[in-house]
Structure formats: structure tokens, C-alpha cells
Image: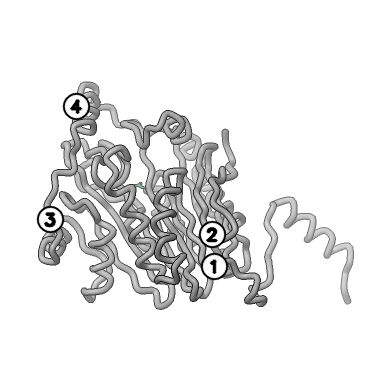
Amino acid sequence: MFDRRKFIKISSFTSLLGFTKVAAASDASAIIKPIVISTWDFGKEANTEAWKIIGAGGNVVDAVEAGVKIPEADPNNQSVGYGGLPDRDGRVTLDACIMDGSNLSCGSVACLENIVHPISVAKLVMQKTPHVMLVGDGALQFALANGFIKTNLLTPKSEHDWKEWLKKAEYKPAINIEKELSNKKIIGDKNNHDTIGMIAIDATGNVGGACSTSGLAYKMHGRVGDSPIIGAGLYADSEVGAATSSGMGEEVIRTCGSHTVVELMRQGYLPEEACKKAVERIIIRNPERAKTLQVGFLALNKKGEFGAYAIHKGFNYAVKSNNEEKIYDAKYFMD
Ligand code: GLY
């Protein structure tokens, strides 16, 4: 027999937690597509580039590659690609991955040096090799064999910042200060880092994503974060949606973050709720550690609904669709 009191109790409990499960999409006309969303406000320019492709009916994988190439080529963005802050040995090492949610094809490169567009190498790993991931010298050899040109990625500004850092050589990644930096038109900082994570749906309803970073400034040589790890920094499955992350990669890897978000959406959680639960898992397992670091997740379901959540205040993201072009602030647990 239906127990109304028990039902009210369960409903109140789930609404107290702030989580509501939703039915699967059934009304095809309600789907927002194409749509592209990216981490941070610098994702706006990247979205504009991606939109040139998906807005004209192009493929989602081509679109996210084109979008992510914008911050990769920007010397003023010290957290992605050319001009990225180096490791403690002064070497700029790049991580990137790309995923096609229609068939779970994916490609990735890690610790790649001297190539401006690691995302394009990752795409070729996906398209031309039997593998998912190439790292270090192997990734470089593959890139050069496919026509990429060697470039010195260490700009004078990043070299100067690294030499300043060497005076004390203290490795202290700080809680995000991206918003402040962004207001000052500085992207990235010697104590900080962020990442471009872009997820999108094309006009055919196919979901995909791309992620690229130079990783934590002054990391140990060889350190790889979440961004090139399929399931950590990025995951896309056209049956469900996609997710990506920014922030302390070690925490995202520990929790298989983006895959967790996508699987929560598969269970029926809305994007923001799925991101919130994934962030909560990081906090619950080590609340003290979580006080000192930032992680933000960004998610998009196959209906075109999107959302984000972060440990700390300051994470934001850029959205572009036929309905809007806007920067949103993510919700968060801690000031
Ligand atoms: N999320 C980027 C990194 O940790 O390298």
C-alpha cells in the first residue's frame, strides 16, 4: 500500500540534499542543439570559434578542436598551450584529450613538448592510431611524423615568472584566484592554473568534448594531471551527455571525476546536481585537503541542459547556443 507519510519523508530528505532525479528526455523538440560550453570566461572566445563549425551544421569533434586551439595559441593564457607556465625545470609540457561521444572514440597526449596544438595531436591519435594515449617523446615523434612543427613554447613572460619562482622555489598551488586574474585580464598565475575544458552537442545531437592544459605551474617534470585522462578531465557519451573539469587534477583523477558526473547524469541527475555530487565526493573523503584546493566540474546532458559546481567560489563558464551567449558563475561549497 502507498505510504504517504513515508513518501513525504523521502521527498523531503532528497530535496534537503538538493538532489532531484529527472525522467529521461522524451520530447525531441525540447533539445537545445547545437550548444557549446567551456570552462572559465576565457572560454567565450573559444566557444565563438567552435560555433563557426557547429553553428553551421559541422561535426562536434571538429568544433571542439577548433575552439580549444584558441587559448592554446594565446601567449597571454599562461595555463594552456603556447606561453603556458613551465615545470620546475623550465620545460613547458602540455596535456590534452578529445572524445567523440557517438562511439566513445578518444585520443590523448600527455607531457608533450614543443607543439602549439596538443589538442590536434590528440585528435590524430584518436583517428590514426590503434591507441588512446601517447606521452612524452612518443607523442612528439608522432606529432612530427604528422607534419606538426617544433616551437619553443616558453615565452619571455613565462620564462621571467619561472625565474622569479626559482628564487624561493616554493611549490604552493593556491585556491583559485581566476576571477581576480580575469578581471585584471591576466589568465593563469605562477601559483595557480586552470584549463580549457569544452563540451558540446552538434546539430545531429552528437556529444563531444576537448580539454587542454599546461598543467600546474612548477610541477615536477613528468607530472600529468587530469586533463588528458579520459574519464578524469573529460568524458562524453552521446547517450547521456558530457562533463569536463578544471582545478587540481590529482583530486579529479582520484575520483574519476568527469566519468562520475556522466554516470550520475545517466542515473537521472541534472547536470548541476551531478557536478555537485562529484565535488561533494572530493570534499567528503578529505575535508581538510579540500579547504586548500579548487576543483570545478562542468556538465551538459543530451537535452542541452547544463550546469557546474565547484569546491570554492570563483569557478565560471561560458555558454553559446542559439538561445544565449553568456558567462555563468558556478555554485560552490566554500567561500
Ligand atoms: N586540471 C589541470 C591539471 O591539474 O593539470
Instruction: Identify the secondary structure beneath mark 2.
Output: strand
Amino acid on which the number 3 mark rests in the picture: Ile
Amino acid on which the number 4 mark rests in the picture: Lys
Packing grade of label 1 (10 A; few <14, some 14-19, many >=20) is: many
Amino acid on which the number 1 mark rests in the picture: Lys
Residue 265: % across, % down:
57, 65
Of labels 4 and 3, earlier in sequence is: 3
Question: Residue 148 sits in which quadrant?
Answer: bottom left
Separation of marks 1 and 4 at Cα, in angstroms: 46 Å
Q: Nearer the viewer, mark 2 or mark 3?
A: 2
User: Of 243 and 47, which appears nearest the observer?
Assistant: 47
Residue 70: % across, % down:
33, 50
Separation of marks 1 and 2 at Cα, in angstroms: 7 Å
Amino acid on which the number 2 mark rests in the picture: Ser
Of labels 1 and 2, earlier in sequence is: 1
Circles 1 and 4, Cβ within 8 Å, touching? The answer is no
The response on whether ligand 1 sits within 8 Å of label 4 is no
Q: Nearer the viewer, mark 1 or mark 4?
A: 1
Q: Is residue 83 left or right of residue 245?
A: left
Q: Which residue is mark 4?
A: 163
Residue 226: % across, % down:
36, 53
Q: Which mark is residue 149?
A: 3
Separation of marks 4 and 2 at Cα, in angstroms: 42 Å
Q: Is residue 198 left or right of residue 320?
A: left
Separation of marks 2 and 3 at Cα, in angstroms: 34 Å
Packing grade of label 4 (10 A; few <14, some 14-19, many >=20) is: some
Question: Residue 109 sits in which quadrant?
Answer: bottom left
Separation of marks 1 and 3 at Cα, in angstroms: 36 Å
